[in-house]
Image: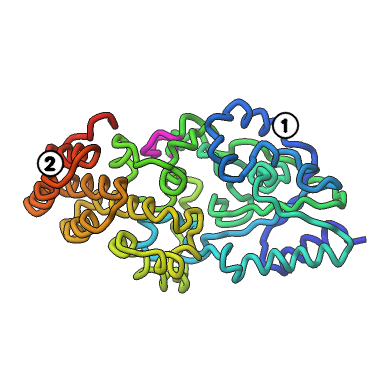
Amino acid sequence: MVGKSEVIEKALECGFEDTGFTTAAPFEAQRAYLEERREDYAWAIRSGLDLIAGTDPKSILPEAKSIIVIMEAYFREAFPPSLVRHFGRCYLDDDRMTQGRLAKRVKAFRAFLRENGINSKVPSHLPYRMAAARAGMGTFGKNCLFYSRKMAAGGSWVLPIALVVDREFEPDEPTIEVGCPDWCKNACIAACPTGALSGPRRINPRRCISYLTYFGKEPTPAELREPMGLCVYGCDRCQSVCPRNAPWLARELKKNEKAATMVEDFRLEKLLGMDKAWFTEKIWPHMFYMSDADLWRWKMNAARAMGNTLDETYIPHLTEAFRRESDERVKAMTAWALGRIGGPAAKQALAAFLAESAGPIRSEILAALEGVSPPGDA
């Protein structure tokens, strides 16, 4: 019968540098936390990710006896700065849709388990970070992220992958604790521009920039537009300022060639002007949380980021988008962005749009011309 050492060896052969084991007992503390914060996480359930159900491994695999956690580092190579300033690093070499590399390695590992009589499930709604901590693979950060004991120089640039299995393995010693030093002075909490982090391991997901960029259903609230800065899809602020991540950020890494090919396709002006065909071919395979029905959100995020660059070269693109786009949320954000950049050309464009606009769009234009927040949004 295959044992832990053989499983670890196979995981390493498949490219996973760390492996841990824990029981299939329910994650009771996580369930209690989610129940307490049910309103904050209702959006996840509505999107098909039932996080509460995922706290019971037996709801995923009735014969569950253990959980095997394998660890992937998603930040092994340097990403182009032009992408890092707008996108979370975990999306810049993500092949979950194209199934090019990581999926094949997970498949090979599962095939090994199956060949040895072990059935496995890889659920998306199980608390995988908590599973990794229960398997002793690292500790939590105050920013709610998981920090590896072995990989990325002890940093958080990792993705735990949890497999629920029907074979019992001796569990590893849990490390369910915050591993941050006292001297960090809560750097991640202080650095969160939208106030999503309210304390160690306390987060309001609906104020998190990642949520706001790809799950929010309404225009970005006026008071969060400037704080969200240049983020278009995801955010790494709390990781980038973290002292525990400094050793890895200081390393000279070779260039990620795949990400380098994305630079031109992901320029802000191209995102603002893209159609469904461009999105489906160029964007969605890499960043897939939004469908082609949500092009408005991509365009709105791109316009907001343009505004926060204060770069006048974006004024023609924003002006054209206002004229071209029919979605009021996009038009509103292009108006805001023009006002944020300011200057004679932006004001001239806004003044021309004012005469032909009404309702919320007119309010956005007036606010942009006056350099204030639109009424009712602040």
| Magenta stretch in the rendered image | 188-196
Vertical relation: 289 (above or below) 184: below
Horizontally, residue 121 falls left or right of residue 323, namely right
- N-terminal label among 2 and 1: 1
**x, y percent for residue 30:** 66, 34
Residue drawn 67% across the image and 61% down it: 17
Of 263 and 142, the residue lying toward us? 263
Q: Amino acid at mark 1?
A: Glu
Vertical relation: 196 (above or below) 71: above
Residue drawn 65% across the image and 65% down it: 103
Is disc 1 placed on a helix, strand or loop?
Answer: helix
Vertical relation: 360 (above or below) 293: above
Instruction: Mark yes or no: residue 65 visible.
Output: no
Residue drawn 53% across the image and 54% down it: 157
Instruction: Mark yes or no: residue 297 visible.
Output: yes
Instruction: Quickly name the residue at label 2.
Output: 369
Q: In the picture, residue 293 is in which quadrant?
A: bottom left
State which quarter of the image contains the C terminus.
Answer: top left
> Does 195 lie within the magenta span?
yes
Horizontally, residue 223 falls left or right of residue 110, namely left
> Does 174 lie within the magenta span?
no
Of 122 and 367, the residue lying toward us? 367
